[in-house]
Image (cartoon, rainbow, N blue to C red):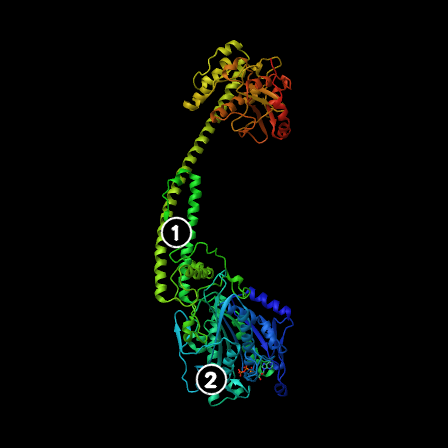
Amino acid sequence: MHSLQQQLQQQQQSDADNIKVVVRLRPLFPHEQSKGAAEVAHVSEDYSSLKVVVPGPAGATMQKEFSFHACLGPETSQADVMALCGIQQLLDAALAGYHVTIFAYGQTGSGKTHTMSGKEDIISDDAYNGHEHDGIISRAVHYLFQQVHTRKDAKYSLKASYLEIYNEGVYDLVHFNPKAKSLPVKWDASYGFYVQGLKVVPCSQQRTMMEVIRTGMKHRKVGSHRLNMESSRSHAIMTIYCDATPTDPNSYDFGTIRYGKLSFVDLAGSERVKDSMSEGTMLKETININKSLSALGKVISTLAEHDAAGTTAHVPYRDSKLTKLLMDSLGGSALTLMIACCSPSSLQVEETLSTLSYATRAKNIHNRPTVQYDPREAQSSLLRREIELLRQENGLLREQLRAGGAASGSAYNSLPTTPKVAQLAGEPSVLGIPQQMGSPGSSVASSPIAGLAAPGALSSSPVPHAADEQAAAAGMARANSTGGLAPHSASTEQQLRASLNELDLRSNAARHAAGVSSSGSPINNSELLRRLRETQALLVKFSEENGRLARDNEKLQAGRNVLSAEHATVLDEIDLLRGKLSQLERNVLTAAAMATTTNGSQPQAQQQQQAPGSAAAQGAAGGVAGGGLINIQALLASLGLGGDVAADLPAVGVGPQGAEMGGPGQDWSGTADAEFSLRPSMQMPSGSSSSSPAAAAAEISPGRSVLVSPGGSSRLGMKSRSNLSSASSPGPSSIATAAKSIINRTPLRPSNADTVSFGASQQLEVYSQLPSSATSTSSAINRPLPFKPQDKAAGFLARKDGQQQQQQQRPAAARSPPPRG
Ligand SMILES: Nc1ncnc2c1ncn2[C@@H]1O[C@H](COP(=O)(O)OP(=O)(O)OP(=O)(O)O)[C@@H](O)[C@H]1O
């Protein structure tokens, strides 16, 4: 049994919104056995399915299997039914504000009344105090009163009504008058179908409600036919209204009445006239019973078919009084349990199969269980929620603006202030909703029926108000539509509905704050109107404020766009400069190559006499060629980088090639603006025939890279123009890099290694070093070269895979002083 309970719970959670269907097999009676009946229906061991042995052609048999939320065998006791059908959860749901319907369906004599009401004679006993044969209704009443007397979370008020649908007429079974006319079934856009004039009995005591049940059962039409000695000739609906006013101020719906309802529907059984042998009045009853059950079957089929297919269709609720009053339970907002009662007898196998077929279809019906509130309160709650949402949205916008303002500096500060929002946010609303109402977060998940009810089942579905008891009574079905609610877009409405519960807390607290009675009594119309007007005024204010914030936001956005455009322009300029730098580098390399060649044949003095800065590229190259001096300014000018940039540049010189590698004893004194050292293990590019770094550099084709990074164990000095005479010649690519550094106005520091893409397998590495003072430079350049001059070409280029090793050497190498002459 325990596993069945678990199974039920799992199923309830998996298809929480669908109608739950449980099948109950009654025992095979001795009088049936005596007529040769055999048991043809058997419940599986795990209670999830049942098999029916169906007679086939020529005496053969076949088995049909059906599965349901639970299948209860003949041995199942009345107490087990309560537990295995999850009745207690449904009762808790009703106390939490849901509409719950439990209905028994099945052929005549299959045990519907036994399941719902138990043994009538027991209940009829004045000394009744509970019995093992009690059905669901009396057990439910007992549980409900037990709960309402012990629960402290809400003030509960229970009421009851009992009606029957007999020959398509509706009759009050409590205030019974045999001569009374049928009560009219009316439609209300907000409330759905309801029985006008049905009396609802307030029941503060359990015995009062039991009296209602007893009276109702006594007045219900019962007849005797061949299939059932006490056959119900009508459909009976016993309704318990559970109004709950939460009393805990910390509760999410403090003070807002929840209108839960429990409907116990004991249907008249279908019967075949030839089997029941009904005649006369009973025949008429049988025809009407079958007619209304047929209408019920159509509703179930239509709903099941379309819910399974995800389509909508006209559901023929209006075809009978029964289906009108069950409208809320089938495809509506109620939690519904159908108990399909069956006989195991082989003599009734066709009826059993028919019942199981209906029950199978009913499984597919999808309901939307919702907590029920008064529609007028729901309406004002929706408005309050809307205000709250607007308030939150405004707060969020302000936060975003603040964040945006911080990012864009003065732009935000120049925005117009929004005193109204600040004012509104800081004070209670017109409705008196305090700001410290607490954050939303209440949800039905915390309700006792979380496992049964659909998540997000909170809703403002309107239900009859307590003041309209007469209209509200007797299984008044609610329309599927959300009649009476303010028009909203579907998503907004959904959102608002989803938060309704928590906001009804606000409703009550608002009433407190506004000094309005919070006794739970209905709000009168003028008060409601006044509040609605105030709400509307507040909404107008908020929408104005929203508009203002949106405009401010647009201004900020425009400011951001300008900044982005400027940023993009700067990036473009950088790209342009990079391109020009590459060009400059190539020019320098070419010039250096020429200088190498020229320096070999010209006297040093003559080289130094060549004035730097002869125009354009020719000047640059000529400077090198003429005196070993590269005029960066001239080069930049030749590249179109004149003006400010070129004016800032120091001239950088290339010394005679002989001094380039800074051989021992060479004079490196003076202030260096930047120094570059070459790695000793560098290799020439394949196919290179150059014998010097400059020549090697000259062979570097465009697009190859120069890596500038700190350290290096061999050095080339790059000196400022003033120290040119004493400087050793740096590698030409070092000059190019220095030029780049100057153009970018960033000093070459050991940390700012730079790489210009160079090639896949080889790269030229030049390590930069910018001494912090002349003294350190001076001491640095007095160190000996760690490699011989003949290694210099080999040291110029290095494979990339040698880089790691070199990097490890760098700190020591950086500290190594270059040689002094
Ligand atoms: N599970 C059961 N265990 C014991 N007796 C049962 C069980 N189910 C039904 N009965 C008995 O079977 C008889 C018929 O049951 P019941 O009146 O509940 O059927 P019904 O479906 O309500 O029929 P009808 O539609 O004609 O009113 C009753 O005497 C009842 O006590």
In front: label 1 or label 2: 1
> Which quadrant of the render holds ligand 1?
bottom right
The image shows residue 225 at horizontal and vertical percentages of: 53, 88
The image shows residue 258 at horizontal and vertical percentages of: 47, 67
Q: Is residue 798 left or right of residue 324?
A: right
Instruction: Of the two numbered discs 1 and 2 on the same chain, state the one appearing first in sequence.
Output: 2
Of 599 and 306, which appears nearest the observer? 306
The image shows residue 136 at horizontal and vertical percentages of: 56, 76
Q: Amino acid at mark 2?
A: Ile
Residue occupied by mark 1: 424
User: Is any part of residue 66 visible from this angle?
Assistant: no
Of 158 and 493, which appears nearest the observer? 158
Q: Are marks 1 and 2 in contact (CB under 8 Å)?
A: no
State whether label 2 is within 8 Å of ligand 1: no
As measured in the structure, the alpha-carbon distance from the residue carrying label 1 to the one carrying label 2 is 66 Å
Image quadrant where one finds the N terminus: bottom right
Q: Amino acid at mark 1?
A: Leu
SS assignment at label 2: helix
Residue occupied by mark 2: 287
User: In the displayed image of the protein, which residue is found farthest to the bottom?
Assistant: 280
How many numbered discs, if any? Answer: 2
Compared to residue 439, the image places residue 320 above or below, namely below
Compared to residue 249, the image places residue 38 above or below, namely below
Image quadrant where one finds the C terminus: top right
SS assignment at label 1: helix
Mark linked to residue 70: none
Of 96 and 674, which appears nearest the observer? 96
User: In the displayed image of the protein, which residue is found farthest to the front?
Assistant: 515
Compared to residue 405, the image places residue 780 above or below, namely above
Q: Residue at x 39, y 45 (%)?
A: 553
Q: Residues within 10 Å of mark 2 (few under 14, many from 20)?
A: some
